[in-house]
Amino acid sequence: MKSMRLLAEGKPLVLTSVEIPSLTPHSAIVKVAAAGVCHTDIHLVSGAYDLGEGRKLSSTGGGSLLPLTPGHEIAGRVEDLGGEAMSSGFKKGDEVIVYPWIGCGRCRKCKSGKENLCEGASTFLGFGRDGGYAE
Ligand SMILES: [Zn+2]
Ligand SMILES: [Zn+2]
């Protein structure tokens, strides 16, 4: 599938061909219809978040997270569902907005449905994992 990837900090995204992600039992494949460009994506591409007063925080782990497909504001249509995801209430063809946070699934916050506040090893689409600037 086509994907706009960040290959190097501060450089334009590059149109690249990548494998379609593998379907796992608890996941879904979504055909992307649109993906927003957030200010966070701009910081990601530049290589650092501006914390003010001259302080910066690396947005790419000093480049160790690259190459990466940005995009965490994703809308699309469900193409396929893993076996365990069939009971989620979603079905093929549903129009969806993708929840980008991926928590550890074990901590107190994850168990209360707040993966965005995960206290463990968390990531989210478009940062630690490939995001929505793709088909
Ligand atoms: Zn955003
Ligand atoms: Zn967690």
Image (spheres, rainbow, N blue to C red):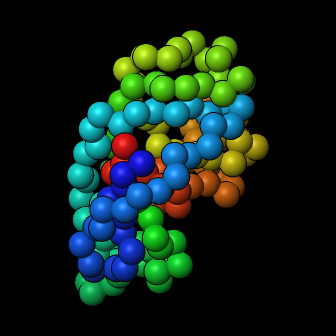
Judge whether 63 appears above or below 112 on screen: below
Residue at the (48%, 26%) spot, across then down: 79
Q: Is residue 100 left or right of residue 11?
A: right
Q: Quadrant of residue 68?
A: bottom left
Which residue reaches farthest right?
106
Q: Is residue 57 left or right of residue 52?
A: right
Classify the position of the C terminus by image quarter: top left
Residue 129 in sight:
yes
Residue 71 in sight:
no
Judge whether 18 appears above or below 110 on screen: below
Q: Position of residue 83 (x, y in %)?
A: 71, 23
Residue at the (68%, 55%) spot, across then down: 120
Q: Nearer the viewer, residue 6 or 60?
A: 6
Q: Position of residue 64 (x, y in %)?
A: 53, 78
Q: Position of residue 76 (x, y in %)?
A: 36, 30
Q: Nearer the viewer, residue 122 or 12?
A: 12
Q: Is residue 22 left or right of residue 25?
A: left
